[in-house]
Image (spheres, coloured by chain):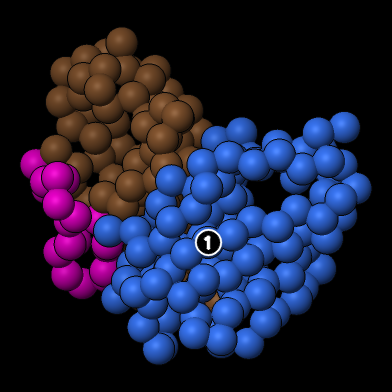
Amino acid sequence: SAVISQKPSRDICQRGTSLTIQCQVDSQVTMMFWYRQQPGQSLTLIATANQGSEATYESGFVIDKFPISRPNLTFSTLTVSNMSPEDSSIYLCSVVFGFAYGYTFGSGTRLTVV
Amino acid sequence: DAKTTQPTSMDCAEGRAANLPCNHSTISGNEYVYWYRQIHSQGPQYIIHGLKNNETNEMASLIITEDRKSSTLILPHATLRDTAVYYCIVQTGNQFYFGTGTSLTVIP
């Protein structure tokens, strides 16, 4: 399975600012995914990031708020823009090599907006 | 959207088997059933997955009914470290959609 590194592991940010989260994978993967986990809740898929094309966003998530980059097959970033306290969550990236192997998740970025 | 339903919470005595059920009545023939767990808001940890046959690994066993509409994850000898939220997931297209999961508490 892949090893995923996410940075930062946690941050406290002022409202109105933006934070970019990085996700680095030790192997080349076609599909990368970004999830949000609000306090006490399950994981919600934000978007699918494919190299060479625009990210595909799930209902309720928009590119202006959560722009995603995918410059190569091992790296992706998620930006949380114009943050408000409601954006306080854990953000996780994940990858899949094939559905016979399942998804691998990073350890997450714990974001607190004050 | 998630295609699974699970009980919200369960308790299990330490050393006993923990049996976690999951319903996935709309599963398609080529969709896998996956089980993950999440401890203290860490990243979800893979446990096991299966398509049609029962599966066993060093962590758990997965029992899938013949009609594939439900499954059960079995932790054979639960320990306190198995206290976590357990998610049963059926892929939808290329995506994983998480349901609410089952919060398992292992009691000493």
Label 1: chain? Answer: B
Residue pictured at 52% horizontal, 48% vertical: B7
Q: Is residue A53 magenta?
A: yes
Q: Mark 1 is on which residue type?
A: Cys
Please tell me which residue is depicted at 36% across the width and 64% down the height of the picture: B3
Q: Residue furthest right?
A: B15
- Relative placement, left or right, of B32 versus A69 is right
Camera-side residue of B52 and A53 = B52
Examine the rendering and report whether any part of residue A90 can be seen: yes
Structural crowding at the residue carrying mark 1, measured as other residues with C-alpha within 10 Å and reported as few (<14), some (14–19) or many (≥20): many
Q: Which color is chain A depicted in?
A: brown
> Where residue A73 sits: x, y (%)?
37, 70
Residue at 64 percent across and 56 percent down: it is B20
Q: Which residues are magenta?
A: A47-64
x, y percent for residue B59: 77, 63
Quadrant in which the C terminus of chain B appears: top right
For label 1, the residue is B22
Question: In the rendered view, does B68 fall on the left or right side of A63?
Answer: right
Where residue B64 appears, as percent x and y from the top left, is: 59, 77
Q: Secondary structure at mark 1?
A: strand
Query: Chain B is shown in which shade?
Result: blue
Does residue B76 appear to the left or right of A89 in the view shown?
A: right
Residue B11 in which image quadrant: top right
